[in-house]
Image (cartoon, helix red, strand yellow):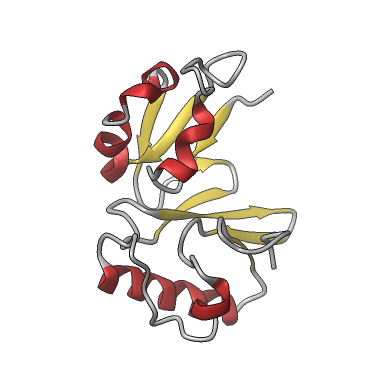
Amino acid sequence: KIGAVALTHSHVDHVNGLVTPVGAIAFTKPASILIHSNEVELLRAEKRLAPALQSLSAFQDGDEIWPGVKVVAAYGHEVGHCAFRVESDGERLLVWGDVVHVPDVQFRDPHVTWQYDTDRDAARQSRLRLMNEVADSSIAVAGAHHEFPGIG
């Protein structure tokens, strides 16, 4: 049973699973949907998602949305694109959404931006900052466009 869904941003490839192809809520009980406050209006603009957004709530950078899960700003791909830093039992994971779109290219050259970044300079800066952070630590990364298994 899914009780809540936290979204890194409002792009269609990340939010389509909130509703079925015929527009019904994809969960047996409407889950709580959380998204960055900068993304709320973009998400609400997708009218077909309206049934799933009855329990929409917004978070800010630095918020702890659940115990051990903190919001990390990762602007650029979208105005409120964010990552989630997860810590549990001494293990750490950074779920960074679309910080990297083309792993084969952007891991070799993180300065490369992507056509779907709304602010390419901000996306580049977010990617460089987060890559430096994970390179200097023992935190694992989960990326939406990384090859299977998507964590490393």
Q: Quadrant of residue 90?
A: bottom right
Horizontal side of residue 119 vs 82, given as left or right: left
Instruction: Name the spot of residue 48 as percent of width and height, x first.
Output: 37, 23
In the rendered image of this protein, does residue 150 appear above or below residue 55?
below
Along the line of sight, the residue nearer the viewer: 65 or 128 = 128
Q: For the image shown, how many numbered marks are present on the structure? A: 0
Instruction: Name the spot of residue 18 as percent of width and height, x first.
Output: 50, 28
Along the line of sight, the residue nearer the viewer: 91 or 41 = 41
Q: Residue at x 39, y 82 (%)?
A: 111
In the rendered image of this protein, does residue 13 appear above or below residue 102?
above
Q: Residue at x 69, y 23 (%)?
A: 1
Q: Residue pushed farthest bottom? A: 108
Q: Residue at x 49, y 25 (%)?
A: 32
Horizontal side of residue 129 vs 44, given as left or right: right
Along the line of sight, the residue nearer the viewer: 140 or 114 = 114
In the rendered image of this protein, does residue 48 appear above or below residue 16?
above
